[in-house]
Image (tube, rainbow, N blue to C red):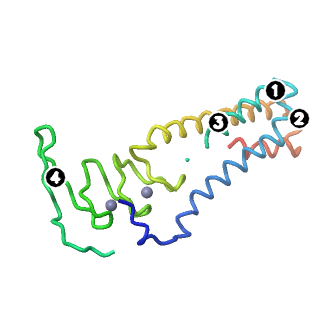
Amino acid sequence: MPNSAGKRFKPTKYIPVSTAATLLVGSTTLFFVFTCPWLTKVISPAVPLYNGLVFLFDEDKDDDFRAPLYKNVEIKGIQVRMKWCATCHFYRPPRCSHCSVCDNCVEDFDHHCPWVNNCIGRRNYRYFFLFLLSLSVHMLGVFSSGLIFVLHHRESLAALHTTVTYPSSC
Ligand SMILES: [Zn+2]
Ligand SMILES: [Zn+2]
């Protein structure tokens, strides 16, 4: 199925994934350096421990013959029309789609996610869902901790630790 011979290196497709990684790692680092020491001291050492665990959890020719474009097969009494993929050289099963970025056919294709630079399909759907879930929990955790930090430092809003907390919380 994979056709590595036709693959070309496209640097532009790595822009979204590296931007997302830089933003996530950057804001989390700022949070740990500037906001966490105070939270550890005042609230609980479990705050950075919890955020650290959640953060770590975030982490994924040529055609020799001319085949007919469509092939009808019967699956459990239902007629299914399968389309020939000229790149992967096989008939696509139902719900299978060819991703032009990955240059592969993907079973139970959902979409190609440029932020993780991969297709979301049959084999990684649940991991992608868990990734989104843990990312949301991580964002909520950093945001609420940052809010607590800022509210306790209202008298020194211009101080370095407080100003760094704003962007890293957002
Ligand atoms: Zn294909
Ligand atoms: Zn893809």
> What label does residue 81 carry, if any?
4
Q: Nearer the viewer, mark 4 or mark 3?
A: 4
How packed is label 1: few (under 14 Cα within 10 Å), some, or many (20 or more)? some
Name the residue: 89% across, 44% down. 159
Name the residue: 55% across, 47% down. 60
Q: Which residue is mark 2?
A: 155
Residue 107, percent from left and from top = 34, 49
Name the residue: 81% across, 45% down. 163
Residue 44, percent from left and from top = 81, 23
Where, quadrant-wise, is the N terminus in this rendering? bottom left
Residue 11 to residue 40: above or below:
below
Instruction: Pick whichever of labels 4 and 3 is earlier in the sequence.
Output: 4
Instruction: Pick whichever of labels 2 and 3 is earlier in the sequence.
Output: 3
Disc 4 on helix, strand or loop?
strand
Q: Are marks 2 and 1 in contact (CB under 8 Å)?
A: no
Residue 26, percent from left and from top = 73, 50
Q: Amino acid at mark 3?
A: His
Instruction: Pick whichever of labels 3 and 1 is earlier in the sequence.
Output: 1
The quarter holding residue 38 reads top right
Instruction: Pick whichever of labels 4 and 1 is earlier in the sequence.
Output: 1
| Extreme residue toward the front, this view | 64
Residue 73, percent from left and from top = 13, 49
Q: Nearer the viewer, mark 2 or mark 3?
A: 3
Instruction: Pick whichever of labels 4 and 2 is earlier in the sequence.
Output: 4
Q: Nearer the viewer, mark 4 or mark 1?
A: 4
Toward the viewer: 42 or 118? 118
> What label does residue 138 carry, if any?
3
Q: Which residue is mark 1?
A: 45
